[in-house]
Each structure stands twice: as C-alpha cells, then as structure tokens.
Image: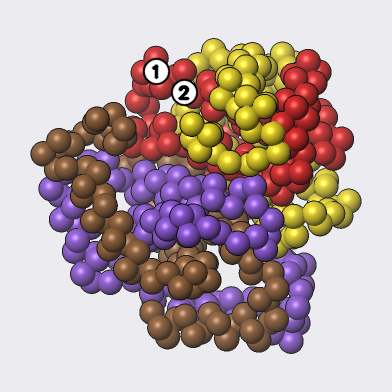
Chain colours: A red, B yellow, C purple, D brown
Amino acid sequence: MEDLKKQIKEFIQARDWEQYHAPKNLALALSVEVAEILEIFQWKENQENLSPHEIEALKQEIGDVLIYLLELADKYQIDLIQAAKDKMALNALKYPAEKVKGKAWKYTEYQ
Amino acid sequence: MEDLKKQIKEFIQARDWEQYHAPKNLALALSVEVAEILEIFQWKENQENLSPHEIEALKQEIGDVLIYLLELADKYQIDLIQAAKDKMALNALKYPAEKVKGKAWKYTEYQ
Amino acid sequence: MEDLKKQIKEFIQARDWEQYHAPKNLALALSVEVAEILEIFQWKENQENLSPHEIEALKQEIGDVLIYLLELADKYQIDLIQAAKDKMALNALKYPAEKVKGKAWKYTEYQ
Amino acid sequence: MEDLKKQIKEFIQARDWEQYHAPKNLALALSVEVAEILEIFQWKENQENLSPHEIEALKQEIGDVLIYLLELADKYQIDLIQAAKDKMALNALKYPAEKVKGKAWKYTEYQ
C-alpha cells in the first residue's frame, strides 16, 4: 500500500496535476470510475457470469477506484485499511447478527 | 488487508448475506456509498474545507467503499493492490508526462 | 412528452430490448449516464465555463438521462412531471424559506 | 414543464440558493439523487417487485432527479424534451435495429 501511495504521488507530480486534484474533484473522479464498473453489469442478470474480457476490464476499473480512493483518503490523513476496519466495527453494532440474519433491510427498518 | 478480508467474510457469513452479495449488487452498493461521499462535497466550493464532523463522515464512507471494493474484487480473485499498480502502469502509457503536463484533458484528446 | 414516450417504446420494441430493460437495469443505466455528465465537470472549477463542444456533449447526456428516467417512471405508471411537482411541494415543507435562507445545510441539520 | 420550471426557480430564489447551484454542483446533486434510486434496487433480484412503500420512495426520487436535470439543462438553455428527442435520433443511427436486435452489446462492439 505504501509503495502504491508513493507511485501515485510521483505520477501526479510528474504531470503537474495537483492543481486539479482537489478533494471534491477526486470524489467526482471516484464516482466516474465506479460508473465504469456499473457499466459492465448494466444489462446483466444478477447471477450472470462475466467474460474473461469483462473481468479484465473490471480489474482495471477496480484499480482506478482504489487509486482515487487512496488519493482522497490521503488528503485528510485517513488510513484506508483502518477506516474500513473501524467501519466494520460500526456495522457490527448497526446490524446485530441475530436481528438481521438472512434479511436485506436497511438498518433504519430494524429499529 | 488480509485481516480485513477475513473480518468482512465472517461478518457476511454470520448474517447469512452471501445470497444478496452477487457481484452486480456489490457494484451497486459501491456506487451508493460513493454517492454518500459526493453528498459531503455537494454544495461546496472546490477548495472549501471540511469540518471535523464532515471528515469523520468521510472516513466512514471511505471505509464502506473499501469494504465493498474488496468484496467485489474477491469474487474474481482480483488482488486490489496489484490491480491498482497494474493500472498505474497503464495510466503512465496512456498519459505520457511530457505530453499532458499541466493539462486536464481526456486521454482521447491527446491522440 | 407523450411523443417522446412513444418514440422510446418503439425504439425498444424494434430492437427486442424489453428483456434487458428491467427497472433495476434502467436505474443502473441512469446512473451510468449521469456519470457521463459528471465526467464533463470532473476537473473543472465550480464556476468554470464549458466549451461549445462540452455543452453539446452535455446536451446529449441530459437527453439520455431523460430517456431512461422516463422509461423507469413508466414501469410504475409514474407521471414524471407530476412526481417533480409533488416533490417540490414536499421540499417546500422540508426547507422552509425563512429557516434555510442562504444556507446549504442538509435538512436534518435544521431540526 | 414550464410550470414546473417556474416553480423551481421561485423555490431557489426564495431560499437564496442560486449561489450554491453552479452547474457542477447540480451535476453532483443529480448523481446523489440517482444513487437514492439505486439504493431501492440495491439488494433485489432483477425481476423482483417493489413494495408500495418503495414505489412511493422511487416516485419521490424520480421527482428529485427531474428537478435537478431541469435546472442543469436550464443553465445552458437546453430544452429537455428536445435534447431527448435529438438523442433518440442519434441512438437510432448508433444502434440500427437489424444489427442489434435482441443483443445488449455496447455500440463499439458492433463495428
């Protein structure tokens, strides 16, 4: 992860792109990349398989999402892995296993 | 990262939620979480600061995005960090530093 | 609007595409088209102008969004214009002018 | 449609919100509203029905999307209905019925 962070930083500096990478713009870029993931699944059935070509495209888009996510987190000194772990702990409180088992409701509906 | 992956897997199994987490649905969930990041920046100026409360909310949403991203990647045995590194290498070819320096065009416009 | 609705219906039937246009897929398609709008603004300043070429692209994407929105609404016999008017009435209650004047807070913060 | 446009304009002026409604921010808001539509379908099967409560929520979100879409279009004097009709004409050229009948490929794959 530290390697990757360094690689991204150098990439942006070499292109003089810090000026464009305001956090708001990174959030937007993140959203655009996620839409490219959505596009792959757009007309498929829920259980339909992806072709090898589609999996390769998915891999690239997932890469882009992680790049922007890391860059955005870094603007606020947020540690990505720690943020996810902390959120998992919150989710465990929000969705107690015995209450939500097998149900896909929104958490507001459990209360 | 491996810790986190294990934590996510156990969380889902304990809730019997594998049935809902088809890749297409995970892509959708990813998109919903990214929109919650967008919401934070929605009415702000590009350079406007976030409040401590907003940074905390951002941290939580970033955590959610990583969780779903990891889960989606895992469905296709995609290594998240490797996918981002490989994409960085592709981006370096797509956007040669000497050609794009200081410019925010789309790559199709350089050709 | 009725013209447009008819035009869309004939377009889909002529291509035998009803099978793909489940409401969930239309929601996804809507999201993909909106991301193409976001892409136009992605690296811009909040007050930056669009080029004539970008405005033309925006017009096309806005067209696509309306097409999918209309198609999705139609699946549930929702009248698009009426839905917006009813929502405006709700918004007026949610955001009383005297309370929110000049402020961009989320409505939950007024309470 | 003209009624609705007028209603939106008055709503914004009464709240002194023009300052926040830069086109870029409206594009963002549009994206946030579409994600609220996605959220309704998030964990559902492709053919799964919505409850009356979900259809009512969908109607409200569709209303919000049309409101922001109209506002965004208006910033560039784009006529919403005309934009959709023009896009339908382009789509008919992009996807000739005899070539794409029954297939859900991306148009770049037909060429």
Does residue A81 appear anywhere in the picture? no
To the question of a shared chain for discs 2 and 1, the answer is: yes
Side (left or right) of D11 relative to D34: right
Say which residue label 2 marks: A57
Tell me the subunit letter for badge 2: A
Tell me the subunit letter for badge 1: A
User: Which circle marks residue C34 in the picture?
Assistant: none
Please say if the residues under marks 2 and 1 sit with CB atoms less than 8 Å apart: yes
User: Which circle marks residue A53 in the picture?
Assistant: 1
Q: Residue C92: which quarter of the image? A: bottom right
User: Residue drawn at (58%, 41%), measured in percent from left and top?
Assistant: B105
The outermost residue toward the front is B98
Locate residue D6, reporting x and y percent: 49, 85
Nearer-the-camera pick, A36 or C22: A36
User: Residue drawn at (48%, 35%), measured in percent from left and top?
Assistant: B108
Nearer-the-camera pick, A72 or B21: A72
Locate residue A102, reporting x and y percent: 53, 33
Secondary structure type for disc 1: helix
Does residue C26 appear anywhere in the picture? yes
Q: In which quarter of the image is the N terminus of chain A?
A: top right
Side (left or right) of A50 relative to A65: left
Locate residue C32, reporting x and y percent: 45, 45
Q: What residue type is labelled 1?
A: His
Nearer-the-camera pick, C67 or B74: C67
Mark 1 Cα within 10 Å, few/some/many (few <14, many 20+)? few
**Is the residue C30 above or below the residue A30 in the image?**
below
Nearer-the-camera pick, B82 or A86: B82
Side (left or right) of D88 relative to A36: left
